[in-house]
Amino acid sequence: MKVAIVGYGRIAKRHHEVIQENQDELISVCDNNPAALQKAIDKDPSVHTYTSLSEMLVSEPEIETVAICTPSGLHSLQAKECMDAKKGVLIEQTMALSIQEADELIQTADKYSLTAAVCHQNRFNGPLRQIKKVQRAGEFGKISHASLHVRWNRNENYYQQAKWRGTWEMDGGVLMNQGIHGIDYLLTIMNSPVVSVFGKIANRIHPFNETEDLCTGILAFENGALATIEITANTYPRNYEETLYLFAENGTVKIGGACLDQIEYWNVNALANPSTEDDQFKENEISKDIYGKGHLSMYQNIRNVLQENKGNAEIKEYTEAKETKENKSEPLVNLSEGKKALEVILALYQSAKENKEIRLPLKENFSTMKMKGFLNDHE
């Protein structure tokens, strides 16, 4: 697979490593910072560099997939430009900062029949795969409820490194930036659409930001299950945990680790903990950082989908079960899947602003910009 990267910051370096590990070809890197481009060249002298996305798209016709690794507020605009140039995309979270932008991306991908995905790499974690396997077998029975805790630390230095962080225009707060992966994970294991949310947000110890550093909320699902969330950047003095509990008729599960990649408790119909008995739970799947090890699986999934849609019979094995749309293979986390966590987060913001329960799907084009000034008015 021939890949380009737009935005060569912290997360882009992980993409670069994974592209090399997956034996894909990084054709080019685009960034408006010459120092960032030099880092890409230092890692791979053969890579072509650009300061203009438009120029890169015209100059490199062989690109198949563009990894969008820029600040969140630029994702939808740049992803659409790439897709209008008939390039597939892998968009780092979040795919957009409004429902309208997300819908436009979905429509554009469908219009050109492109392979487009959102980077929710934790979907490929071993514990989540095991939970889905047990769900398909009916072992859990009825789900009662779940609880998600993202208790991390982000200090002033973190935000000073990139001025777009902690702004409503380019980022969103702890929900949108730090919590979105956990929320996506939660929605995946609950296996039912969210019908309503009620949320509260606050900025308790980051007065230099205009966004929240704390959110608590309740999610109600179509199947009657409930979930609570607590997401914060206020855990002193460092990241403490990302933990998810699932309580069901025939089982209780606790997932933890740096990025929800470890089974810490498992009792499902008295079955043994698969992390000690199942070959897929090898020690090398456990990550020491919050990015986890799912990026490689995401790239493998996208490459396999591209090969399948080209009719290439050489690649048969998928990292995960493929999605299909009108006889076309889709990535596991296609744009419609990526929109789910985004919509829940925007609904939680709207709930906090209006101090009421919000029904889903959202009936208005809510965006992070509609939160501007909210926390200043509620100090």
Image: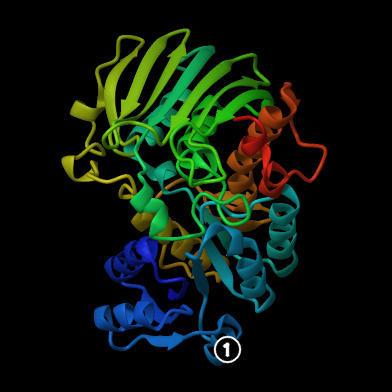
Tell me the colour scheme of the image: rainbow
Quarter occupied by residue 241: top left
Q: How many marks?
A: 1
Instruction: For residue 26, say whether it is visible.
Output: yes
Q: Residues within 10 Å of mark 1 (few under 14, many from 20)?
A: few
- Does dot 1 land on a helix, a strand or a loop? helix
Looking at the image, which residue is at 57% across and 45% down?
Answer: 210
Quarter occupied by residue 337: top right
Q: Is residue 236 above or below residue 268?
A: below
Q: Is residue 323 above or below residue 37?
A: above
Which quarter of the image is occupied by the C terminus? top right
Percent coordinates x, y for residue 169 in the rendering: 63, 55
Looking at the image, which residue is at 26% across and 35% down?
Answer: 237
Q: In the drawing, does residue 340 fall left or right of residue 215?
A: right
In this view, the residue in front, 11 or 329, is: 11
Percent coordinates x, y for residue 40 in the rendering: 33, 78
Q: Which residue is mark 1?
A: 55
Looking at the image, which residue is at 55% across and 66% down?
Answer: 89
Quarter occupied by residue 19: bottom left
Q: In the drawing, does residue 246 fall left or right of residue 326?
A: left
Instruction: For residue 316, say whether it is visible.
Output: no
Looking at the image, the residue that sits furthest to the bottom is: 59
Q: In the drawing, does residue 292 fall left or right of residue 228?
A: left
In this view, the residue in front, 270 or 207, is: 207
Percent coordinates x, y for residue 276 in the rendering: 18, 27
Q: Is residue 283 above or below residue 39?
A: above
Which quarter of the image is occupied by the N terminus? bottom left
* Amino acid identity at mark 1: Glu
In this view, the residue in front, 316 or 94, is: 94
Q: In the drawing, does residue 263 fall left or right of residue 143?
A: left
